[in-house]
Image (cartoon, grey):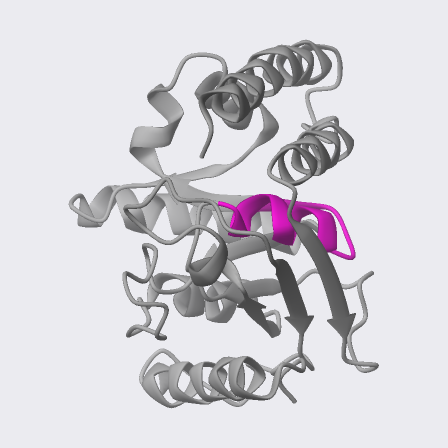
Amino acid sequence: MKPLRLVLIMIYTAVLGTACIVGCIFAPSGDALVPISRIWSWLVLRTCRVRWTSTRDPALDSSRPCIYVANHQSLLDIPAIILAMPCGFRFVAKRTLFHIPIFGWAIRLAGFIPIDRSDREGAIRSLASAAERVRRGTSIIIFAEGTRSADGRLQPFKKGGFLLALQAGVPIVPVSIQGGHDILAKGSLTLRPGTFRVGFGAPVPTSSYTFETRDALIAMVRERIALGLEAGLPPS
């Protein structure tokens, strides 16, 4: 990635992060985040000369809170899914991100959910807080692999997002994000032209699953995301 692009992205982040902080101070709900983050995402992808498209299964009701579970290949997956999201949202994010000046302050005020997998009790408290937010009507985005895939292949899924969906009693929407590994792979600053394709699948009801049968739920959602990645279409 060219230094000028990196500088521009840092400027966008500082300016719009500050705007988000101000917006969240005056509107404590954190809803100022969504329009500002979409502007940031558009600027980032435009600056990187990357395109994006999205498709949605007809069964997806964007007015209903859900847990959106996605695969993760690239840092640019984040602006791609933000632009494609059909509703307001919050992310579950690594706690370390909340320590970044301006950016971390903004996402904390906006209501992102910090999680530290090395602190089991703290992670449980974070998921309980997130479940309450979902029950109040906010959809949550989770990258189920926990980190970016080094080779672009779908990695094993962490359980946290599925426990959150079961605790909140809401469906899971499988999201297949294609193109990230080819555009900006993990551990690389080589930016290649390309198009992100974000496919939102049909919601998977969680009412027939329990904490004891969560592994079957994880397997089903992972299979649907994998099928979406293979077919270039939203999983169904």
Is 5 in the magenta? no
Closest to the observer, 172 or 79: 79
Residue 145 drawn at (x, y percent): 34, 64
Which quadrant: the C terminus?
A: bottom right
**Residue drawn where x is 64% and y is 48% of the image:** 50
Residue 180 drawn at (x, y percent): 49, 58
Report if residue 72 is visible in the image.
no
Placement of 78 over or under 183, stated as above or below: above
**Does residue 31 appear to the left or right of 70 in the view shown?**
right
Q: Magenta residues, as a range?
A: 76-90
**Does residue 80 appear to the left or right of 151 in the view shown?**
right
Q: How many marks?
A: 0
Is 80 in the magenta? yes
Placement of 37 over or under 172, stated as above or below: above
**Does residue 212 appear to the left or right of 235 in the view shown?**
left
Q: Quadrant of residue 119?
A: top left
Residue 128 drawn at (x, y percent): 43, 50
**Does residue 164 appear to the left or right of 58 in the view shown?**
left
**Residue drawn where x is 44% and y is 35% of the image:** 1
**Residue drawn where x is 32% and y is 34% of the image:** 95
Placement of 6 over or under 214, stated as above or below: above
Closest to the observer, 17 or 125: 17
Residue 150 drawn at (x, y percent): 27, 61
Q: Quadrant of residue 214?
A: bottom left
**Residue drawn where x is 46% and y is 66% of the image:** 71
